[in-house]
Image (cartoon, helix red, strand yellow):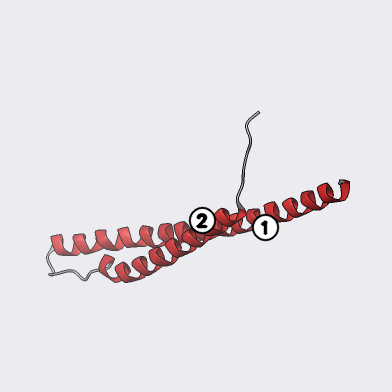
C-alpha cells in the first residue's frame, strides 16, 4: 500500500508562492492595461479598426486576468486551509497515540 506523506509547511510555502505570483501578475496586468487601449494613430479606417481591435482584446483580457488572479489566490487559501487541517489532524493523532502508550 502506498504511503502518502504531507508536509504542511510545504503546502504553506506553495501558498506563499502562489500569492506572490498573483501579486506579480496583478502588477503586470495593471502596467500593461493602458498599452492595450491605444488611441488610433490616424483617422483613416485601418488606424481606427486597429485601435478598436486592441480595445476589444483589452475588454476580454481584463476580466480573464482578474479571474486568473482570483483563482491563484483561492488556490493559495485552499492550500493554507489544507495545511492547517493536516497539522490539526496530526496533533490529534499524536495525542491519541501518546494516550495509548
User: Considering only vertical position in the picture, is 76 above or below 38?
Assistant: above
* Residue at figure coordinates x 63%, y 55% from the top left: 83
User: Considering only vertical position in the picture, is 6 above or below 47?
Assistant: above
Determine contact: label 1, label 2, CB under 8 Å. Answer: no
Q: Which residue is mark 2?
A: 14
Q: Residue 62: x, y in percent?
A: 39, 62
* Residue at figure coordinates x 27%, y 68% from the top left: 37
Q: Residue 89: x, y in percent?
A: 74, 51
Q: Which residue is mark 1?
A: 84
Asked whether 49 or 55 is in front, the reply is 55
Q: Residue 31: x, y in percent?
A: 32, 71
**Quarter of the view holding residue 21:** bottom left
Q: Is residue 73 left or right of residue 32?
A: right
* Residue at figure coordinates x 87%, y 46% from the top left: 100
User: Considering only vertical position in the picture, is 31 above or below 53?
Assistant: below
User: Considering only vertical position in the picture, is 5 above or below 86?
Assistant: above
Tag 1, which secondary structure? helix
Asked whether 56 or 99 is in front, the reply is 99
Q: Is residue 26 left or right of residue 100?
A: left
Quarter of the picture containing the N terminus is top right
Q: Residues within 10 Å of mark 1 (few under 14, many from 20)?
A: some
Amino acid at each position: 500500500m502506498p504511503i502518502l506523506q504531507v508536509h504542511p509547511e510545504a503546502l504553506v510555502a506553495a501558498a506563499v508562492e502562489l500569492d506572490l505570483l498573483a501579486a506579480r501578475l496583478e502588477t503586470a496586468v495593471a502596467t500593461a492595461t493602458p498599452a492595450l487601449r491605444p488611441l488610433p494613430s490616424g483617422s483613416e479606417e485601418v488606424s481606427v479598426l486597429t485601435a478598436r481591435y486592441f480595445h476589444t482584446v483589452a475588454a476580454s483580457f481584463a476580466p480573464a486576468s482578474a479571474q486568473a488572479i482570483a483563482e491563484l489566490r483561492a488556490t493559495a487559501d485552499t492550500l493554507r486551509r489544507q495545511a492547517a487541517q493536516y497539522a490539526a489532524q496530526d496533533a490529534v493523532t499524536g495525542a491519541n497515540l501518546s494516550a495509548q502508550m
